[in-house]
Image: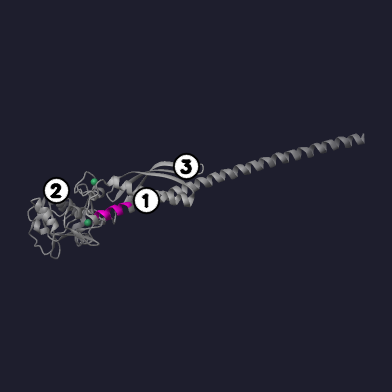
Amino acid sequence: MKIIYNDSKGHIFTGIISIFIISFFIIAILLINMNYFIKSENNEIIANDNLKYITEDYIKNIEILSYDTLEEISENAVKSKNPVQDVNKEFKKVLNDKLAQKNIEYNNLYNVNIVSDVISIENGDKPEFLKVKVFLNIKKENNEFNEIIDTKTTVLNLKDPLGLLLCEGSTYNETNVIYEDSLSNYLSNRNIENSEHYINATGPLNIKKCPYDPYIHHGDNQTLSDCIKNGYYHESSDGSCYLCRLEAKSTCPHYGFETFIIPRDNLSNNLSSVSSSDHVVFFENYPGNSYNYSDSRIIFLDNSHRLKYGL
Ligand SMILES: [Zn+2]
Ligand SMILES: [Zn+2]
């Protein structure tokens, strides 16, 4: 009886041990699996993060290279005095070449395959920013980024070749276009009265945005004088946009810029000639009366520009 009891107790004990051992194995297998699952999921996240980082970095490079492309195109136009024939086409060609170099660099650095193709460059809401569309496919192992991306680039501090392209014989220094006889000849060829006031005229060379906004305050104190001294550009629906300036278009349907062309010095304050806003000088050619903005310096202004700038 005692033995039987011990026997049955022994069976129960063995049974409990067996259950423990089996449970231990099941739990161990589950833990190993779970660990493997977590690990592989982490690897996936790391790979995705890696691709995300590479893509973000690449898009930043598109923005930088877009600016470099515009800089290269505008410098060429200024130096050669040849207008760009088709700025969209030229931009695509130059930027695609730059991106092809970048793609090789990225392949070496990050082991990614990149296919990129510039689709377009066009005006944005503000004339100082342009929109650049690029098709982008980036592959790294089993991860892929595939999208048409919209980036933007600024035109601030780029050279404006418009005056140089329109007026044969004009020259430039670091900051200004120097017209000598070229602008007065351009105007007299268009039968503009008093075109001689624009002998030795100057205009700005680099796109700088006028900080005196709203523009109506240009009449306050030294504001206009300071604006002209710095060669600032203003938003204008009548003025040419940056892309059209590269093509030597003195007017265009896009929202663009206007800047002042400064007639020669020592003109008296009771004269008239074509109004000094660049889109009027180069294209519309309507007259304005002299406005004295500093000692012995005048510009010509029509009524609508007087109103716009509060002068
Ligand atoms: Zn201004
Ligand atoms: Zn335009």
**Would residue 262 appear left or right of 146 to someone viewing this image?**
left
User: Along the line of sight, which residue is nearer the eye, 87 or 152?
Assistant: 87
The correct choice, above or below, for 108 with respect to 3 in the image is below
Residue beneath disc 1: 98
- Ranked by sequence position, the earlier of labels 2 and 3 is 3
Q: Secondary structure at mark 3?
A: strand
Tell us which disc is closer to us: 2 or 1: 1
Q: Which residue is mark 3?
A: 144
**Which three-letter amino acid code belongs to the residue tagged 3?**
Glu
User: Can you identify the residue that label 2 sits on?
Assistant: 284
Horizontal relation, residue 132 to residue 290: left or right? right
Q: Amino acid at mark 2?
A: Glu
Q: Nearer the viewer, residue 53 or 235?
A: 53
Q: Position of residue 69 (x, y in %)?
A: 32, 52
Q: Which residues are magenta?
A: 69-78
In the image, residue 296 above or below residue 124: below
Q: How far is the residue under mark 3 from the one under mark 1?
A: 22 Å
Q: Amino acid at mark 1?
A: Lys
Badge 2 density bin: few <14, some 14–19, many ≥20, Cα 10 Å: some
Give the x, y percent position of residue 236.
22, 49
Quadrant of the frame with the N terminus: top right
